[in-house]
Amino acid sequence: MSGEILSIKTVKDYISLENHLKVLSEIQVQLDEGQNLADIIWTMELDGSISKGLIPAVVHTLLIEKMQYSCLSFNLSARASNWNEIHNSVKTWNQFDTVIAYYHPQLDVSLINPSNKDHWSRIESLAPYELMVVFTKALNPSQQEKEVEFLADFKAISNGNYAENEKQYQSTEIEPPKHQPRVSEPGEGEEKAEAAEEVSVEKAEEPQTEISPSDTKKRRITPKYGVQVTNELFHNGNVEAWRNIIESYEKKHFGSTILLYHNDQRIKHISALFKWGKVKVGDSIYFSIVGEDIKDVAKLKKYLYQGASPSYIYFIKKDVNVTLRLF
């Protein structure tokens, strides 16, 4: 019996390895055409041809081992920039091909082409102290020695320290990497030209729609919403009320997760931070939602506001092991 199990496991491992190598080969072809890895992975995630778990291995194998990109990893500071500011600062830096691996506490790793605004909008906001790894390679080999300087400047911008000369990595002589997969050119010969013309006519008749993360039901994160504390102290009763409200929301909207923040820091365990006297009247606690089809945001905010007020008692009156039906 053990031999049969081992045999089955070996076959599964072989299939997994074969699929991995196939994915690497397909991506390598597009990289050789001058495309950015984050754009390639973005398309593959939308059509479901790659899983999140495979992304770190792809990045390491192709960018580090095979193509020898320079890289810099760092944790974002408390002054982490708004992603819009980073995008606006570096979107014209076309002397380098750059890929960001941002490790979000709920969305896991997300690959970002810093000049592609769609990639940034998927994560909504950058969280202080989270991990960011920046990979880059000079498109002109003569600029290779500037890669370390480029990475240092990118880190500074990510943490709110803007470079004095924001166009120092911009060149009109270099065409930036393509955002979308490049369409094959029509082949030579009269028959191929006619076939290409027929395909063009068919495509012209189709409605042109832009794919967005919401259309493909991909997880996204909302902006942060503030809830002001109106109770004299945010004590254990308020903590329990918030716990019950969040439990009710996450049970109703299965797959959604509530993230909490206070003083620009992520709160992973409510009880550990909201001890007696820690949060007082007038303080604000922020929340955001991670999920696919996000609903009832206004209702959630209303209940959390009540839970942070003297009216919190309504949300703690329930039987043990029973979830409140609020949504």
Image (tube, grey):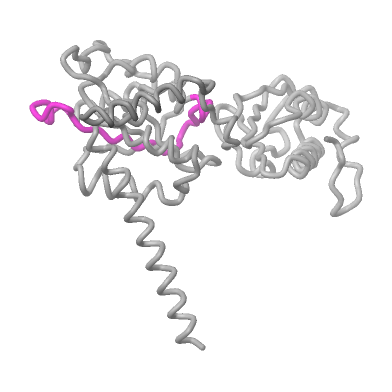
Residue at screen point 59% across, 30% down: 215
Relative to 79, is 42 above or below? below
Residue at screen point 22% across, 37% down: 32
Relative to 29, is 285 above or below? above
Residue at screen point 67% across, 40% down: 256
Farthest front residue? Answer: 191
Q: Residue 303 lies in what quarter of the image?
A: top right
Q: Position of residue 67 (x, y in %)?
A: 20, 42
Relative to 17, is 82 above or below? above
Q: Position of residue 140 (x, y in %)?
A: 13, 26
Residue at screen point 75% across, 26% down: 301
Choose between 186 and 307: the one closer to the eye. Answer: 186
Farthest left residue? Answer: 142
Q: Position of residue 213 (x, y in %)?
A: 54, 31
Q: Residue 274 lies in what quarter of the image?
A: top right
Q: Can residue 209 be seen from the camera position used here?
A: no
Q: Residue 116 lies in what quarter of the image?
A: top left
Q: Is residue 134 magenta?
A: yes
Left or right of 139 in this view: 76: right
Range of residues picked out in magenta: 121-146
Q: Is residue 183 magenta?
A: no
The image quadrant where one finds the C terminus is: top right
Left or right of 40 in this view: 258: right
Relative to 29, is 17 above or below? below
Left or right of 179 in this view: 234: right
Choose between 153 and 167: the one closer to the eye. Answer: 167
Q: Position of residue 143 (x, y in %)?
A: 12, 26
